[in-house]
Amino acid sequence: MSLRVSNLRLSVSVPETDLPRFLAQRLGVSVETLSRWRVLKKSLDARSPSDLQFVYTTLVDLPDEALRSEAVRRRIREDVQLFEPPAFDDPAPGSSPLEQRPVVVGSGPAGLLAGYYLALKGYRPLILERGLAVKDRVPAVREFDRGGAFDRENNYLFGEGGAGCFSDGKLTCRMEGPDVEWVLERFVECGGRASIVYENRPHLGSNKLPLICRNFRRRIEALGGEYRFGCCMETLDVREGRVVGLQTSSGYLATNHVVLGIGHSARDTYQMLFDLGVPLLQKAFQLGLRIEQPQEQINRHKYARPEYLTLLGAADYTLNARGEKAVFTFCMCAGGLIIPSVSEPEMFCSNGMSNSRHDTPFAN
């Protein structure tokens, strides 16, 4: 049995390597008694600009005799609890072999993880991506930035990694649990920082995402999966209410299992699904605007002490205003860039991104 120690508040100047000392103090034991420990959650409390603190939730293993000791038992209360981490619910595969391999449409976050999990379970998925591999996608995006022609199928939104590959790399998820942790651990295996598993606002960085996407692909291929780039799904072949195949820009594929991870900008695909009578549920419409401001201005407002910038890097913020209509900030990119997230010719749309170091002069 483990202990979950919550609400451990330390100055941001205290390195994580010092955590065992403070955990031992909280539990009334020696540092040597801690069999094992790890951080479950880490967030920044910035309500007092002159006294910024990290707030930790940790998991601590103690020997049985230490757990039974009166010193530890006295400390088991709201912030110190006996805790058994929930196990990842790994679904059992079916017993009937598939006649054809499953097809995953799209290689953004949804398609990437669906393909990885299917490959991990031995299903050898075929992953279709209308855009190109990330190594071929980067030159096309850079050329567009320089004023070159827009490519309908290979751009900021379409291609290996989806829109996220040239977005910010925020791993935003408002849920917790072993399945979320499992996903974050896969990103670590493919090149993300180990701390993204427990950070309150995990961030990969736009400069890291191409390598991470490529590493995911190599793992999927090593497990028997296959990618086909420049291959756009044109229509599903549905007979008697069941999928039997799909027509692509490269030909027909027979399959009874299709996973759609098509993102938000494949409007032609959504129209095709609507025409086929596939049930669709609309999301509430929101209008977003990008603003840009000097990063130094935000740092000065949030950090009362100059050393905080060295310790924490570029500052970010979240704002919410409640009135007749809700207005709030979203995807705040500290030390970032504004980019054209365009998916159609003669259309303008912006997005924000930042590299892992958050080191440009502007926030957005």
Image (tube, rainbow, N blue to C red):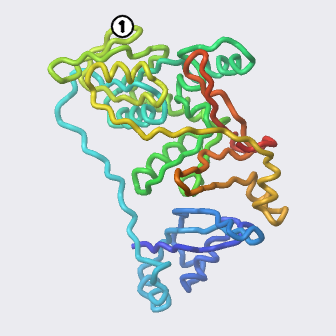
- Residue at the image point whose x is 63% and y is 34% from the top: 351
Q: Residues within 10 Å of mark 1 (few under 14, many from 20)?
A: few
Quadrant of the snapshot with the C terminus: top right
Q: Please give left or right for residue 15 compared with residue 164 in the image.
A: right
The percent position of residue 197, horizontal first and vertical second, equals 53, 53
Nearer to us in this view, 124 or 319 = 319
The percent position of residue 357, horizontal first and vertical second, equals 73, 45
- Residue at the image point whose x is 48% and y is 50% from the top: 173
The percent position of residue 115, horizontal first and vertical second, equals 40, 31
Count of marks, rendered view = 1
| Type of the residue with mark 1 | Gly
SS at badge 1: strand
Q: Residue 322: which quarter of the image?
A: bottom right
As drawn, 155 above or below 284: above
Which residue sits furthest front? 324
- Residue at the image point whose x is 51% and y is 74% from the top: 5
Residue identified by numbered label 1: 251
